[in-house]
Amino acid sequence: MLDVIDLAESTADPRGLLPRAQMDVTAAIEKIRPVVDGVREHGADAVRQATRRFDGVELGPLRAPAAALAAAADALDPAVRDALTVSIERARAVHSDQRRVDVTTQPAPGGTVTERWVPVSRVGLYVPGGLAVYPSSVVMNVVPAQIAGVAGIAVASPPQKETGLPHPLVLAACALLGVDEVYAVGGAQAIAMFGYGVDECPAVDMVTGPGNIWVTAAKRLLRGLVGIDSEAGPTEIVILADETADPAHVAADLISQAEHDPLAASVLVTPSAALIDAVEAELATQVAATKHTERITQALTGPQSGVVLVRDIEQGLQVVDAYAAEHLEIQTSDARAVANRVRNAGAVFVGAYSPVSLGDYCAGSNHVLPTGGCARHSSGLSVQTFLRGIHVVEYTAEALADVADHVIALANAEDLPAHGQAVAAREATASEHRGERQRARSGASAEPSNRAGARR
């Protein structure tokens, strides 16, 4: 089922040889540009028109009523409620430790630089629909924003044809998290609504959350007008495994990510030909027994999935670092030591009992992660995503005078003499003030003796 790429004797850069899903965001931008421009020019009417066209839903109010959120929460299956509660609790525990504190540094006497961490004021969180429903993505987006201290949190998710509202599980998750601003809007029109604002939904400062190629294209188009977390592509799993791995576990984990989408990437990297054969046998049995057999088969047999045969785990580490997977599992002997050597991954899952699906729901980690090799330079969603570091600089006159010559020298070296003059002007003013204070002190010390003479 999986194509095999033999790199065991190769010394070439593996990046051009590895399977990877392709996504032409540039072409998608041109297709969704009229939708985005329409929302900018016509507001909520354009949002409704796009929803009618793409989702087949006639929207009234864009915002889901509070009663619908409460009803969805009340109707939750108790097992699902308990699972969401645990997911929220663990996510809050992990993300609470990410909150940075303000720090003041004194680089010189009389001079301080304070780094303040300030949350963005308002965010739009996108929760996809389509082939699956993702209440877990509500948790992963909302929890870090809340812990960061974001005051305004809005959620958008595609409407269901039957109700004209987001999926009940999405509504229920929002209710459990205390989010009551939820919009029945999906696709590029949701991102445009967040970016430009409409009558029912004020504009946001940042948009986060995964979505399909149209959502990704809209995020790229509006980047700069709003901040974005990342351009999410199809999901990925890479498993670095040796002969100690259980082939049933490996196959199950490859299938679990393939279940997301026909474009999902499932890649096994191993030095063990025996493991490859055993995993192939497991795939033949397990795929046939799954609910979404056709979708999974498309993903596993697509050009984005496969097996990479390597000489040893050392070469395997080079390959997985070159791939920079969204999700990386390490199923080897001494898995923790191997995992500690990984440099490029959205998240690393260590050992036989840490599957990616644990991270998708209840590990406490965040599952909104960089794809398409972006883990080489980017991180997953976190509390930091919603915070901005602001430097607050405060120097006394004496502290400025102490460093003035250096500022002026650098300003002149860069041929920006007015920069230096801005410091020199303060030196002149400070010198005048010092003279005035000295004269005032001299006058004050002479006055008592004059009064004494007058008394005599």
Image: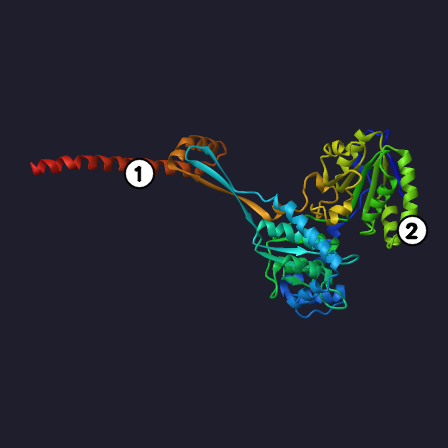
Residue denoted by label 2? 288
Is 424 left or right of 98, judged from the image as shown? left
Tell me the element at label 2: helix
> Which residue appears at 20% of the width and 35% of the height?
445
The mark total stands at 2
Residue 13 in picture, x, y percent from top left? 79, 32
Q: Amino acid at mark 1?
A: His
Which mark is first along the chain, 1 or 2? 2
Camera-nearest label, 2 or 1: 2
Q: Which mark is residue 433?
A: 1
Q: Amino acid at mark 2?
A: Ala
- The answer to whether residue 247 is visible is yes
Q: Quadrant of residue 193?
A: bottom right
Q: CA distance from mark 2 to mark 1?
A: 86 Å
Q: Quadrant of residue 322?
A: top right
- Against 419, is 161 above or below? below
Residue 269 in picture, x, y percent from top left? 83, 37
Closer to us: 298 or 340: 340
Tell me the element at label 1: helix
